Image (cartoon, rainbow, N blue to C red):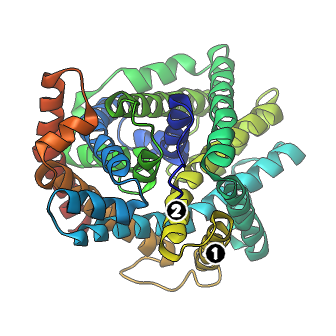
Amino acid sequence: MQANEEFRSGFGFLMAATGFAVGLGNIWRFPYITGENGGAAFVLVYLACAVVIGIPIVMAELLIGRRGQASPPDAMARVAIGEGGSGRWRNVGRLNLATAFVIEATYCVVAGWVLWYLARAILTGFAGVDAAAASDGFADTLGNVGGLMFWTFASLAVTGLIVFFGVNDGIERSVRVLMPTLFLLMVCLVNYNMVNDGFDQAIDYLFTPDFSKVTPGMILAAIGQAFFSIGVAMAGMMVFGAYLPSSFSIARGAVMIILIDTVVALLAGLMIFPIVFRFGLDPAGGTGLIFQTLPIAFAQMPGGQFVAIIFFLLLSVAAVTSMVGLLEPLVAWVHDRWAVPRHRATVYTLAALGATSVFSVLSYNVISDWQVWGFNLNGVLDFVSNQIMLPIGGLLIALFAGWFVSRATLSDELAMASPAMFSLWYLLIRFVAPIAIAVVLVTGLF
């Protein structure tokens, strides 16, 4: 990291940080997880988890990044040493980086699916697609090694181009355009749904809770979704904290990030579920909801090609902005560790990610029969990163901020106007967040 790298404005930081948080986790994963867990009751539990767990840890990551002024490993070490502790805390930053690398190497493949479907939407609009054709089309997508490789590398190339030009000319400049574009596209689709059938059903589904659906399993799913969606323990928030001006309120920024992230998730529901209900589709359609179910609806609705283009365009924007947040801390670390210019650090990191993503692509086809613990390679990587690495990383960040950084340092860095609000955050980061994350970790493992 260069010492003078800093977001020019609070708006630029918010767009970058929310762009990292707002991704396929909101638009692709949130609707089908909501569908599988009963709708509105799940939404309420998710919101509670986002506030009670998400906000405290995001604040901790931003605090550590700004205090440490370095890539995540060095930021952790600097803060720890400044508190009279051990530089071995850098290993937490390394774990966050490893998590980001694994997630990026598999996420870029799914982002490639999105770009490919965007191209199909532009060329054909899914004309004549029925249930069988949609299912066969997605199967053909996964089986086409060359096509998957091309679109996977395309997603990495677009992301790398943004990061290549640095914090101000690359990340900040791009998100100032991409994030408002994403919001505008979402609002357009929601407005489209408001004047068509299915919208009232979607409102009821998302906002009329059935508390009989609240079970331990559903609560754990909500915690996991909040963790995944917000981008906790993936190094992105920590590195964006390092670029955060000292005058910007971390608490206000964290609340805004969670608020925007949640609004986007709810808009995604209002964007997808009306279409699902209008055409009698299954709201609990799982991962196939986006790629196997909605193309059927696009084929049947008036103006379906236009709607499909907008839909997959906004998915593409969400995927790229999240990938930027995963790539930037890796590039910053390579830059710090080997003292190479940013553009070379970007190329080296992309090369490593591209090589690793090949195995992810092949696990959908050529080596799909390779099994470990009953999972194929992608299943193993998803399990290890989401069920083990993310919770451990988040738990260690919470413990570090809550128990190893002095209260005086935390108070000084956060500079919250209300002592009561600081005390509440301190309670959450010391006790509530670690306990909740530990439960997720143990449940994921056993």
Residue 298 seen in the current view: yes
Of 4 and 385, nearer the camera is: 4
Q: Residue furthest top?
A: 195
Q: Residues within 10 Å of mark 2 (few under 14, many from 20)?
A: many
Q: Residues within 10 Å of mark 1 (few under 14, many from 20)?
A: some
Label 1, label 2: how far apart the Cα atoms are: 12 Å
Question: SS of the residue at dot 2?
Answer: helix
Residue 135 seen in the current view: no
Name the residue that disc number 1 marks.
348
Residue type for callout 1: Tyr
Residue at horizontal 22%, vertical 36%? Answer: 412
Question: SS of the residue at dot 1?
Answer: helix
Residue at horizontal 42%, vertical 75%? Answer: 380
Residue type for callout 2: Ala
The dot on residue 332 is 2
Q: Relative to residue 356, is residue 128 drawn left or right?
A: right
The dot on residue 313 is none
Of 310 and 213, nearer the camera is: 310
